[in-house]
Amino acid sequence: MEGFRRSMRIVEDSMEKYAKMLGIGYLNFFILEVLEEAPENCTQKLICERTHLPKQSVYLFVKSLWEQGYVELRELPTDRRNKEVILTESGQQYVEAILGKMKHAEQVAWSILTTKQQEIVVEATQAFAEAFQEALES
């Protein structure tokens, strides 16, 4: 178990150092990923649900993105209290610049593994995640 935790910490530390180098918070990576992959009607509530981050953290980062012109905020016709968060063209470029290097690094690291190692990582991680979730729920 110790080796697994140490390995995950190395990945997290690397991502945190990269985020600091770019001048953003580590957890903001997750918000950017949701915005990049978001379906229609992406709201701050949806971002909170997908990232498990507090509303205030999401609000502050989205507000910062809005002030920089990276997102637009539009009222939802079905619920005027919530606003849709939409990446602008410059926002899409920003997200690509931020996440692009990280995704490239993930792809390079993944490609170094053999197909068998990739399968083992996926299977073992899924099994651990399911067992961990079950243990917490019981």
Image: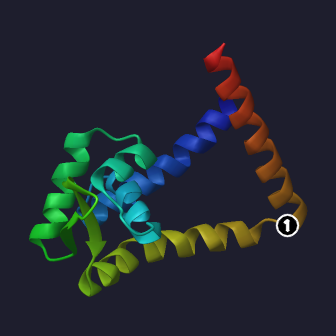
Please tell me whether residue 84 is drawn above or below residue 90 in the rendered image.
above
Quadrant position of residue 30: bottom left
Is the C terminus in the top left, top right, bottom left or bottom right quadrant? Answer: top right
Relative side of 97 to 127, left or right: left
The answer to whether residue 96 of the structure is visible from this angle is yes
The answer to whether residue 1 of the structure is visible from this angle is no
The residue sitting at 66% across, 67% down in the picture is: 109
Relative side of 118 to 98, left or right: right
The residue sitting at 67% across, 27% down in the picture is: 132
Quadrant position of residue 64: bottom left
Q: Where is residue 18 in the image (x, y as percent from the top left)?
A: 38, 62
Which residue position holds label 1? 114
In this orientation, which residue lies closer to the viewer: 130 or 14? 130
Is the N terminus in the top left, top right, bottom left or bottom right quadrant? Answer: top right
- Residue at the extreme right: 116
Indicate the secondary structure of the residue bearing disc 1: loop
- Residue at the extreme left: 67
Q: Where is residue 40 in the image (x, y as percent from the top left)?
A: 40, 69
Please tell me whether residue 55 is drawn above or below residue 121 in the rendered image.
above
Q: Position of residue 129 (x, y in %)?
A: 69, 36
Q: Residues within 10 Å of mark 1 (few under 14, many from 20)?
A: few
Q: Where is residue 16 in the image (x, y as percent from the top left)?
A: 38, 52
Relative side of 4 to 81, left or right: right
Please tell me whether residue 62 is drawn above or below residue 133 in the rendered image.
below
The residue sitting at 42% across, 61% down in the picture is: 34
Amino acid, disc 1:
Thr
- Residue at the extreme front: 78
Please tell me whether residue 43 is drawn above or below residue 67 in the rendered image.
above
The residue sitting at 40% across, 40% down in the picture is: 52
In this orientation, which residue lies closer to the viewer: 29 or 15? 29
In this orientation, which residue lies closer to the viewer: 128 or 112? 128
Relative side of 125 to 82, left or right: right
